Structures are given as C-alpha cells and as structure tokens.
Amino acid sequence: MSACSYSRPCWLQWTACTPDGRRRSTRPDEIATRVLNTEPASSEGFSSLSIPTHRGSTIVYPDYESFAARGKHQRHEYTYGLAGTPTTRTLQNRLTELESAHDTFLTPSGLSAITTVFLAVCSPGDRVLIPDNVYPPVRRFADGVLARLGIVAVYYDPRIAAAPIEAPERLRLVWIEAPGSTTIEIPDFGRLHTLARTQGALIGYDNSWATPLLHRPLEQGADIVVEALTKYLTGHSDLLMGSISVASEELACTVHAYITSLGLGVSPDDCFLALRGMETASVRLAHVGFSALWLAEQLQSAAPVDEVLHPGLPTFNGHRCWRKRSFGTSGLFTVVLKPEDLGAFRRRFDSLSIFRLGASWGGTHSLLAPVFLDRERSLDRSYARKPLLRISSGLEAKEDLLEDLMGNVFA
Ligand SMILES: *Cc1c(COP(=O)(O)O)cnc(C)c1O
C-alpha cells in the first residue's frame, strides 16, 4: 500500500497506542470533529474598552424557519458576512452619528465610495456637475466609465469669482469637493445648492479634506457625503476604506441595493483599525491643523514661494466662506513655487530628513507631493506649468518641520 491513500490522510494511517502498549479507545479521526466543535470561551465578565473584531462569511441560523426567512431580512440584520458583522456595523453607526446622517455604507476605498455614489444614483442620459479641481481619478472615471454609460459629466469652475454655472438638462447630481484637491478652492456653496434644488438634483460632497470633525455637509443641505477614511479618520497610512453617508431612507435603499448587487464589502480587521484610529482623530486633527496653518504663515515669506493656498489664511480667496461653514482647517495645504527649470525643482527634494515624498496624506508622518496640474484641469489653466508642492503636516514638532522645509525645499 502506498504511504498515502486519497481516502485517508497519512497522519491517520496508524492507530496510536497508549504508553503501556494498549490501543486507544477513541477513533483516531475523532479529533477532526472535536477541533471544530469546542465551545468558545464565555465573554461574560469581559468588558473591555476595545471594539471586538467579528469576522465571518457564513451566518448560522438556530432553526429551519429562521433560515428559510433569511431573504426577507432588513438591511440592519445579519445575513451574510458581506452584508456586515457587528464590527463593520459599529463603524457604520459611528460614522452615521458623526455625519448627522440617516445611514452609512462602507466601501473598499475612498475612490470606490465616490464611484458607487455616481453609479447608484445616475441613469443613462443624466448629467452630473463636477468641479474642475475634483480628485483626479474621479475625472478619469467620469470621462471613461460614466461616458460609456451615457452619463455626461459637465465640469464647473469652483472658484468663488467664477462665472455663474449653467444648469444642464436632466441634471441628476451636483458634486462638490471642498476644499478642492491640491489647489484648495472654496466654492460658493449657496449658489451650488440653489442650482441643485431648482433642478431637482442631488448634492453629493467629498468631505475627505475636513472630515466630519471639521465640517458636516449633511447638516448644511447636502444629500450624500463621502469620506476617504484612508486619510484623516483612520489616520495611520495603513488601510484603504471609504464611506457613503446619506440623508434619507430613500437614498439609503438606493445605495444599499447598488452595493449589495456589486458585492462590495470591507474587512472587519480594517474596520477595527478604522475604529481605533478614529478615537484619536480629534487630537490628531487639532495638532496637524495648528501646525499646517503655522507652516503656511511662515512659508508665505520664503523666497521661492509665489503663493500659499490654505483656507485658514485671511488673505485666501474663500477664507471667510470656509470660516462660516466649518469648525477649522486640517493639515493639508499647497504652496505654489515661482517658475524654475525642472532640474532645480527636483534638487529641492534631495536631502529632506523628516518629510517623505508620497502621494497620499492624512497620516501621522509628514508628506510632500510635488504636483504639476498640466493635464488635470479643463477650465482653470492658471496653475499650468507652475510647480506646486502639496504639504501634509504630520504629528512631528512643527519647528522641526519648518527647519526641514527651509533647509531644503525652500532654500
Ligand atoms: C485620496 C482621496 C480620495 C480617495 O481615497 P482612497 O481611499 O485613496 O481611494 C478621495 N477624495 C479625495 C479628496 C482624496 O484626497
């Protein structure tokens, strides 16, 4: 007989004996059943401050009737791991509370939260208004995927002083991202809201820059708010996740149906990290908000600097508007440098000691992102060919950050 047969794993071929040579009374493969059926320890008396991580794909039912009725379950019940576990629901509930929302849904990234909103609410023939300074992957999504589905993206100039926006026919969604990606514009919110309401369109808002700690769009009339939880809310550059919070049950049903049809879900382990990270978000935001504004003020007078784009600076276009709507500013801002050749610009990043070069933001480490907006904008060309530097202040001491910048990038 060969060492292993298909019907019996090789470690079960021999009948082990007790030390005195007698055969054991239990079947050797009984262990295979036992290993699956040990009772879990009781959690009674274990009251911890940490949110438990509940993992699971399958939900088991106590009897035939409850199994047969599982298709009739409501959104908030447990039916399958993809539809949520107590850990994912805890994160959803926390965000619902922070955003003053009706309900919240989680997606695998901030970008997928945005694309899910567009796909869930729009139909072929609809038009959507998107700001010219939108997070660039959203523009690529709109011009590619939405266009193929017959959903037309119309771009608007988000600058307060821009010409009035003309409402296209069949307007379904007005998208707002403020402060805008990289160039931090604050739009005229009142005008956008009036436009959406008179056309019967929805207002969707990417609130990743401010988070609900600094700004709550649903309290100010938006219908849907998206957060890239990847950034400040989870805050440690170690996971990707997005959230969609909605203002009504009707929108909750629309978004939930779409997410369920696509099979989108997030890992309970990531939700645990998100819940933990969020506990310190207010302290982190207060710290980075303070150092970023201080850095912005200091950098205004540095020799290579043309302009500092930060909504906390009283000279910034939109400062008063943002002050009225929000509770403060976060740690992300941008510096426009005076034009110079690419070689000289590159050399500015050769010997940084604290700042790291990286495309994301919102974590504990300070990051720099050199940016050129040559192809990202179709309306506002004022930044074309200008070297921009996006700065994400982390939790380091602000004096050390300034020294690193002044000694290298702004030398
Ligand atoms: C990073 C970012 C996103 C996307 O978040 P990911 O989780 O990285 O997909 C969306 N909106 C804005 C404004 C962002 O900066």
Image: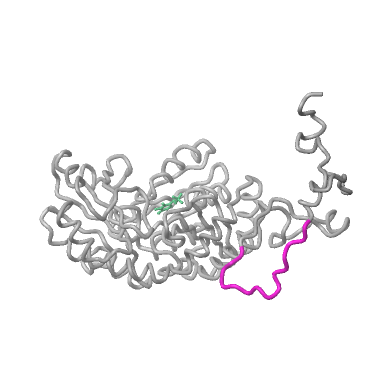
Residue drawn at point x = 51 percent, y = 70 percent: 98
Which percent across, then down, holds residue 153?
A: 45, 44
Q: 149 or 215: which is nearer to us?
A: 215
The residue at the point 48 percent across, 51 percent down is 240
- Provide the major secondary structure of the magenta segment: loop
Q: Please tell me whether residue 252 is drawn above or below residue 144 in the rendered image.
A: below
Image quarter in which the N terminus is found:
top right
- Tell me the magenta residue range: 38-52
Say left or right for 207 vs 378. right
Q: Residue furthest left?
A: 303
- Asked if the stretch drawn in magenta spans residue 56, the answer is no
Residue 135 locus on image (x, y percent): 39, 49
Compared with residue 57, is residue 319 higher up or lower down, i.e. above or below?
A: below
Q: In the displayed image of the protein, which residue is found farthest to the front?
A: 20
Within the image, what quadrant is residue 232 found in?
A: bottom left
Which of the 4 quarters of the picture holds residue 343? top left
Q: Position of residue 134 (x, y in %)?
A: 38, 50
Q: Residue at x 20, y 57 (%)?
A: 404
